[in-house]
Image (spheres, grey):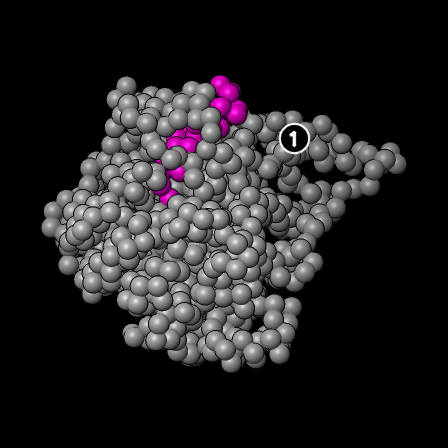
Amino acid sequence: MLKREEKTLSNERISWRWAATAVAAATLVACGGDTMPSNNLPRGFTDLGVTAYPATAVSTGATAATQDLLTGGLGKTGLGAAAAPTYADPANPTAAELRRNALYSNYRGILDPTVNGGYGTLYGPNITADGQVTAAEGLIPGREYRGVLDDGTGRKQTMVVVQLPDSFDRNRACVVLGPSSGSRGVYGAIGTAGEWGLKKGCAVALTDAGKGVGLHNLSDDTVNKLDGTRATRTDEGSLSFFAARLSDAARAAYNTAFPNRIAIKHAHSQQNPEKDWGNDTLAAARYALYVLNQRYGTETDPVPFTKANTLVLAGSASNGGAAVLRAAELDTDGLIDGVVASEPVTEMPTRQGYTISVGGQIAPNAGRTLAEYTTYGNIYQPCAALASDAALSESSIFNYIGLTAMTARAEARCSGLAAKGLVVGTTTAERAAHALEKLRLYGWTRDNDRMHNAHYGLGNGPILSAMYTMAYGRFGVEANLCRTSFAAANTAGEVVPAAATALAQSFATANGTANGTPATVIYNDSLGGARSWPLAVSPSTGVADFGLDNALCQHALVTGVDTATGFNLTDSSLPTQAQSDAVRAGISEVLHSAKLRGKPAIIVAGRSDALVPVNHNARAYTVLNRSLDGSGTRLRYIEVVNAQHFDAFLPFSGFDTRFVPLHPYFNQAMDAMWAHLRNGGALPASQVVRTTPRGGQPGAAPAITAAQVPPFVAAPVTGNAIEVSDGLIRIPN
């Protein structure tokens, strides 16, 4: 066999190497040498079939004849429509209908789909790979291959979809890897890696990385199938995407004590899926190469595509950004050529040996893990959101997330914190100011101040604090960790049966979390009976304060210390020492190494990101990587002012005037990495990008222009340059 060389940049050289490989293999066979290589399904995978999507017309139908790879047949117009496509039978949607609607909801779930926000002008299906705005609908025909990866237990069930556009060029072979953001299903990166890669004519390998929409409704024992439809756990068998590990007797007993509860895959799979995000992304790459060879291999050349002649670019956002960085760290075989991570969750392996300086001031408490800052924020954000510096008073956002009605409960949270000695002050204003200062000292910045209200109001703190501690500790649904569970709830916060139609459509509408579609976070020990987190009454305070006791318990799981008293946990405390040990062991499994060994990478993050704060993530990872990889590092960091974590929030009143989309910078970073890998173009220097918010009246901000989101540059001016050296990153104000 020919010795593998570094991937070449020239099309002619790539074509020559393909021919040379085929000739060499044929020569070996003719001379009695090694047998012809075979294209083998990667270990652990099961093929689920292939569907052709010709994309002949824009349609709200759901057959293969009317769908496409990117938009499910909806086109730019359909994806931008406020109303989701309807089902022929809402109680029994077909797999094709669920696919169409999953593409719709996942695209809109991470991007701003409004015209004034930039959809259709700065990004969108109608914009070509080279940035030309067209009047086209942007449908992309091709084939979609589906596979599932398991570890032999039948419980891992990682979904991978490889989308192979008809525009794929065998002479310029490329694969784009897109692990999903958040806890989303397999189409979770369709608007980021999916759209960018398909427009380039690359095969796109999407994966849920062991997360996804797996809802086991324990009362009727129904689960999601691999194709998104639902049936009973018994009927689905090996086609079940996720089912809780409960015997029939145990499930019956649990249902009696805690009726109408729902187990969620990311939280209850007992797999700690985050530990495998990197390896799952690498597995998706191997499956993509298998698919390419299945499609284009011949009898004389059964394996025309290998890591040696196929450009592999990994790019995604949030948890997907974490997955591509982790995959690059684990990629000792040189499978991945370059990485783009937008707003990544970088689980830092250490908080020692590096310093973050912003405008000459040292950032405190940098480099904490997701579990630490999420559970800490969950304690203080409701109170801190009442501080004058954190006020976001536009009526639209308040009404949307119910903050006006939640004010009394936020005040009660401040009072509860004060009673336990966790904040000081005699008035709500004083206590809120102290809570906000504690968040700043824990690593958030003043740029995050006005995001705390939205993050607690939308339940990000309660959802993530519950889900991730369960996942890290590998707890089953029956554990009720910190007396917390998941279920549908009515407007009074009481547990109710999940609507049959909500479960039936969950593959398309849910995002893999307990965000209320249909399950929300339930605090079982709320006084007066179990209640959803916004209406829970804490036993220790006797008032509705968003379940302060549960929040304190969840943070104690992460620290091993009682949050209120400062005493170490014991075998009889809540939580117990054993539970905390299990959670902390799981956290240790998900830490990044920050060693990229010179692999080119670009991190993009918004300075105002309060969900994944840059001091704990992008900034910390960049400086630690420089210390580990040295001057040979090819990691670059782009920090965007006035950008935050959720572009999907931008249509909200107050967000539209204050923030700009981060997504255009993900696309630009992908373009820059492509130019670097294909043509040897220089990577941009690390820098701050100064954007201009849209301004205007909240809820009616004017249309964004390209001038308001200027591109990053090859060589920034001194006032925008980020300086990174061993142990120190200097970021200008």
Image side of residue 663 versus residue 273, left or right: left
x and y percentages locating residue 475 in the rendered image: 55, 60
Q: Residue at x 55, y 40 (%)?
A: 327
Q: How many labels, in total?
A: 1
Image side of residue 112 versus residue 32, left or right: left
Q: Image height check: is 122 above or below 512?
A: above
Image side of residue 178 versus residue 411, left or right: right
Q: Identify the residue at the far right of this view.
A: 32
x and y percentages locating residue 198 in the rendered image: 46, 47
Q: Residue at x 38, y 52 (%)?
A: 564
x and y percentages locating residue 388 in the rendered image: 16, 47
Q: Image height check: is 252 above or below 550?
A: below
Relative depth, front residue between 417 and 633? 417
Residues packed near mark 1 inside 10 Å, few (<14), some (14 to 19) or many (20 plus)? some
Q: Residue at x 32, y 27 (%)?
A: 362
Q: Identify the residue at the far left of this view.
A: 697
Q: Image height check: is 715 above or below 621?
A: above
* Magenta segment includes 284: no
As helix, strand or loop, the secondary structure at mark 1 comes to: helix
Relative depth, front residue between 439 and 123? 439
Residue annotated with mark 1:
17
Task: Give residue 113's quadrant in the image.
Answer: bottom left
The N terminus appears in which quarter of the rendering? top right
Q: Residue at x 48, y 48 (%)?
A: 568
Residue 159 visible in the current orientation: no
Residue 276 visible in the current orientation: yes
x and y percentages locating residue 119 in the rendered image: 28, 50
Q: Image height check: is 406 above or below 595?
A: below
Kindly identify the amino acid type of the residue bearing the numbered disc 1. Arg
Relative depth, front residue between 215 and 62? 215
Q: Which residues are magenta?
A: 612-637
Image side of residue 532 versus residue 165, left or right: left
